[in-house]
Amino acid sequence: VQEPTRRLRTMALLCDAAERDVGSPAGGSVVSSLGGAAGLLKGGELATAMCAHARHGDPVVLALMRRVLRPVCAPILIHIQRWISDGELEDPWGEFFIRNDAAWEDHNWEEKYKLRLEMLPSFVSEELANKILQIGKSINFMRKCCREVRFESRSPHLTRRITSIE
């Protein structure tokens, strides 16, 4: 009886952690469709909140957190893989830590792609995020400006490896 109760308590904590208070520095941009005062975290913000709960000594809680973190972090890892292998950024919900500012022309890579530090997950340092940003910008530049360069992208073994990282 204790193990299911612990799991339910942990799940309740995670649900609370996934909510953003309107009064918080990052809050206020999303309002619940049910008329509530809190919004839900997304992308790197959510991964950071979940990772904070993953540092736990209880093996039951740790196992539950691993199960929860996989689907939370998988989209971030897929975004990273696509960006560094193809130079493509498709993020219609604004969950990734790199933003594509469509207001800038395609040839303005300095302003068009920027880091969104509020979406940076805790397991990616700012230094690493800058390297990821520069790699993607470079690949994007070569794809758009050096059309004669042929790329072998979307290596299936790379995609499987990145999305299976724990």
Image (cartoon, rainbow, N blue to C red):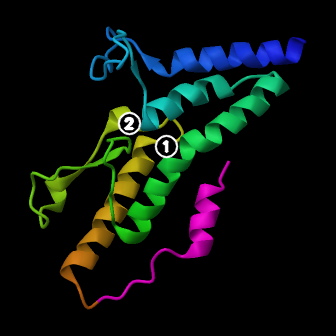
In this rendering, is residue 110 above or below 6? below
In this rendering, is residue 47 above or below 18? below
Q: Amino acid at mark 1?
A: Val
Let me know if residue 58 is in the magenta part.
no
Q: Residue at x 59, y 30 (%)?
A: 51
Q: Which residue is mark 2?
A: 119
Q: Which mark is residue 42?
A: none
Q: Which residue is mark 1?
A: 124
Task: Report the side of 11 relative to 50 (left or right).
Answer: right
Rounded to the nearest angstrom, the CA distance separating label 1 from label 2 is 10 Å
Instruction: Report x, y in % for residue 26.
Output: 33, 21
Seen from the viewer's position, the closer of residues 111 and 151 is 151
In this rendering, is residue 31 above or below 127? above
Q: Residue at x 62, y 65 (%)?
A: 160
Question: Dividing the image into 4 quarters, which one contains the N terminus?
Answer: top right
Badge 1 density bin: few <14, some 14–19, many ≥20, Cα 10 Å: some
Q: Which residues are magenta?
A: 149-166
Q: Amino acid at mark 2?
A: Met
Q: How many marks?
A: 2
Residue 43 sits in quarter: top left
Among the two numbered marks 1 and 2 on one chain, the one whose residue lies closer to the N terminus:
2
Seen from the viewer's position, the closer of residues 123 and 147 is 147
Q: Residue at x 60, y 43 (%)?
A: 71
